[in-house]
Amino acid sequence: MIIVLTGIDGSGKSTAAQALVSSVRAKGGRALLLSNHAGRRVMSLVAARLGVRLPARLSDAVETALRVGNALVSHLRASRFDGLVVMDRHLHCQLALRSASGLPRGRFLPWLLARLPQPDAVIHLNIDPAEAHRRIVARGTDSESLDDLAAFQAGYRDLPEYAGFVKVDASAPKEQLLAELLSRLAAVGVDTDSALSA
């Protein structure tokens, strides 16, 4: 069973993924958290320190290579795990970033996405870019601007796959968000309790 979490930076993907995995484990189930990062945070921090803005195509090339590598490794690990697998980010995220940067969708990522095992659900954490920006500023580890976040959000909504995502309000408190995640998963036929018997 594979669940993918998507959303703009500051939407709480990593926190939600950890909460979901911890919830299943607390009930005695088997759950695995896998992250499909692309090195955006490191690159943005380095670029900010150097006072430069990396060309969109260069950033995308590096991010795509890292994201694809991480996604392939994650799916390999998922194929060997009996239980719930929660993936923090996926190739959808890179496609949304491309759209946000004004780059074409391309053929490779959609081709690969169609050939990898399909997740049981893709949960998109919806949040107002201003709230996401406030969270990012508060944690002090990223340098995303409000305009970047708004463009990223628009990039997700422009994806053909977006219509099939399960949308959840990410501005809710952690406990309420977890309850909403579990409820939405149950509504689309994903039984997280099956991980208890894995």
Image (cartoon, rainbow, N blue to C red):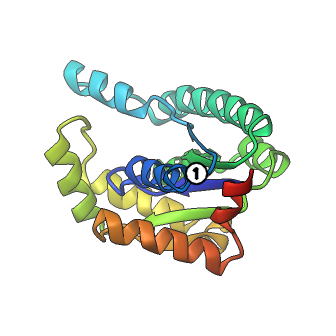
Does the image show residue 127? no
Residue depicted at 53% across the width and 49% down the height: 25
Residue drawn at x 42%, y 33% is 40
Q: Residue, x 67% and y 72% (percent of image)?
A: 164
- Between 123 and 8, the one lying in front of the other is 123
Q: How many marks?
A: 1
Tag 1 secondary structure = loop
Quarter holding residue 46: top left
| Quadrant assignment, res 143 | top left
Place of residue 116 in the rendered image (x, y in percent of width and height, measured from the top left): 80, 45
Q: Residue at x 54, y 25 (%)?
A: 62
Q: Residues within 10 Å of mark 1 (few under 14, many from 20)?
A: some
Farthest bottom residue?
A: 187
* Residue 57 to residue 153: above or below: above
Q: Which residue appears farthest toward the right when viewing the image? A: 115
166 is higher (above) or lower (below) than 55:
below
Q: Which sits in the foreground, 97 or 91?
A: 91
Which residue corresponds to mark 1? 28
- Residue 156 horizontal/vertical position (percent): 52, 61
Furthest residue toward left = 138
| Left or right of 184 on screen, residue 134 | left
Q: Position of residue 185 (x, y in %)?
A: 61, 71
x and y percent of residue 76 in the render? 76, 32
Q: Amino acid at mark 1?
A: Gly
Residue nearest the viewer, comparing 100 with 164: 164
Residue 85 visible in the displayed image: yes
The quarter of the picture where the N terminus appears is bottom right
